[in-house]
Image (cartoon, rainbow, N blue to C red):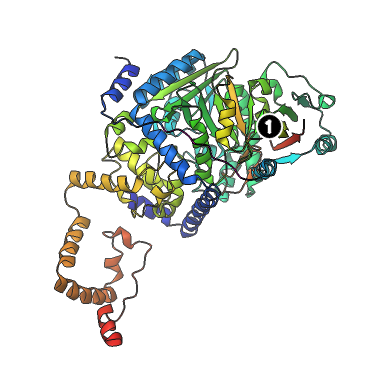
Amino acid sequence: MSHPAKASEFLEDSAKSKWHDETLWFVRDKRDTISKTIPEWEQLRELASRIKDNVLANLDNYLIEFEKNAKANNIHVHWAKDAEEHNNIVLSILQQHRCKAIVKSKSILTEECHLNPFLEENGVEVVDTDLGERIVQFLNQPPSHIVLPAIHLKKRDISEIFHEKLQTEKGNEDPTYLTHAARVHLREKFLGAKVAITGVNFGVAETGEFVVCTNEGNADMGVHLADVHIACMGIEKIIPRRKDLGVFLRLLARSATGQPITNYNSHFRSPSPGKEIHIVLVDNGRTEQLGREKFKNSLKCIRCGACMNTCPIYRRSGGYSYGSVVPGPIGSILSPGLDLKKHSSLPFASTLCGSCTDVCPVKINIHEQLYEWRQEITKDQGTNAKSISMKIANGIFAVPFAYKVSGAMMRGALKILPDSITYSGLNTWGKQRDLPETPKETFKDWYKKNRS
Amino acid sequence: MSSRDSILSKIKAIPSEQKTLPEIPDFELIGDLKELFIQSISGNKGEVVDQAQLKDFLEINRFTKIIDLSNSFQDLRTLQLPEDSHDLADIEVAIIQGQFGVAENGAIWLTDENMGLRALPFITEHLVIVLDEKSLVDNMHTAYKKIGDQHSGFGLFIAGPSKTADIEQSLVIGAHGAKSLRVVLANL
């Protein structure tokens, strides 16, 4: 299903979609406020972008350096060319340890690889431990936002599912009450798990360490109680030096939620005595994206979600309308690289306003890449309705007489066009929008009367 | 070819223009470090207290399961560090010595040497970190300079208690980890 079709489903509950829009804008606003307290904010973005440029230009060398240092620290390093290999590596580690139940903290990569259903098919119970992820897992849904996985749900939805799964009081919607019920439930899972899986925010080539950031502390509760820690990492998550963390940790949480830093920022360098750390380095389409000159900068992404919070389309259409693991503007430039046919409507789910590019902490030119993907897709699909109307417009603007005549016609048409045409299925932009009231005369006529 | 070699050779085959790794300049934070640090901790929903306030907190709540690794409050210690992290499940208060704090965001640096068991600062119901006032630095750049090439198996920047806003963006303190963070700024 295309983005517009799924967006209409989301918009059916107008109160909820209004809340979604306003709440994400509030998060965006917090990001603005905190970024303005840092005089060097723009310099930090520039530095982060240039560090990532350097990484992308030397990725093979940094990966080799990272592997060498991680191995020297007694970390097991695995390489996976695609999702299938990644999943098999994880399963084989679990089988070696005869592990039938794991806890997992937030990892977009494991979502991308569909690790949970794979492990479940192989008899492993997977418990997502981030509160938002646990909520959507109870509902058999994927996350709808990469930082705020359950942002599409209201507390009454969560109260209902917790009543069913955790036997909380029926109708008790108090967030503190519900969170503490989840705390008790997950505490038991943490204490029982032999293997814990986490994602990775940054892998440092110079030291072979990797960093995981959370506010809940769920990644750490999992890995420090388990015997084995498996960290799943996309190959683009490498940064060269430890001191580069100073730049990225200053940007990440401020961009994501408007807080100065996440409350837990864990640097894993070697396992505790008697324990194991495995790291799985995953390609899964990243090298292809790196080879696309116009789109490779999308690999700089540090997954803060700022582009989603600011996007007028994302806020009003919800994460599920994108039908991709990473939704929103950044998802709309990453996903076509993975499956162009499936995700061909995503680069059009944008007004090209450029707000995503303005807030991106690593200065990815997101809106320009959206435009570039549109070119690729229309090349692929030939002429469509919108391009015909653009051609007509081109003709009109080129000839002054045609412009004058068509202006009068449009003012007439706007008045008499029945809603059935304006709001028809052919015009997705008509949804949730009213046509403006038309002026009685042109500016030119008005000027003649009043100024000459 | 192994997946490792095929990934690396695919990357190598992509023509790329050399891009210089930038040096990170010194950025300064203007203001009183102690004041800024206290503000940051309270923004992160932690609390900076003095020794007397800490003693009151422990006495009023009549905690009986207290681990102290800080060497500052030995008279309050009721338990020794166990061997297995799972035995920390019922710990009420953990008191840990922090290495230094960062004024811009309230982050406090801890390593294996401070934690004893890595699970301790997370699994404890309440966390107390003792910090030398003179150890405060301005920002994360200075912080990583201070860490330098220090080699520890596990390092942690901790900035507040466990928190979440996953239910309708309502902030709740005490998601999975410590339900509170108290920082004792000591003038050692």
Q: Is residue A42 left or right of residue B119?
A: left
Q: Residue at x 29, y 85 (%)?
A: A451
The quarter of the picture where residue B56 lies is: top right
Point out residue A68 in the picture as x, y percentages from the top left corner.
Answer: 44, 15
Q: Residue at x 26, y 59 (%)?
A: A426
Above or below, A138 relative to A195: below
Give the magenta-colored segment's residue range. Answer: B22-30
Asked whether B28 falls inside the magenta stretch, the response is yes
The quarter of the picture where residue A234 lies is: top left
Q: Residue at x 77, y 39 (%)?
A: B49
Q: Amino acid at mark 1?
A: Ser
- Residue A396 in sight in this render: yes
Above or below, A361 relative to A353: above
Q: Secondary structure at mark 1?
A: helix
Q: Badge 1, how many Cα within 10 Å: few under 14, some, many 20+?
A: some
Above or below, A195 relative to B21: above
Please give the residue where the numbered disc 1 appears in the rendered image.
B135
Point out residue A312 in the picture as x, y percentages from the top left corner.
Answer: 41, 55
Point out residue A259 in the picture as x, y percentages from the top left corner.
Answer: 57, 44
Above or below, A402 relative to A192: below
Q: Quadrant of the C terminus of chain A?
A: bottom left
Q: Is residue A340 left or right of residue A303?
A: left
Point out residue B148 in the picture as x, y percentages from the top left corner.
Answer: 56, 24
What type of secondary structure mainly makes up the magenta span? loop
Q: Is residue B110 left or right of residue A130?
A: right
The quarter of the picture where residue A50 lies is: top left
Give whichever of B63, B14 is nearer the camera: B14
Asked whether A142 falls inside the magenta stretch, the response is no
Give whichever of B58, B88 is nearer the camera: B58
Chain letter of the residue beneath label 1 in the structure image: B
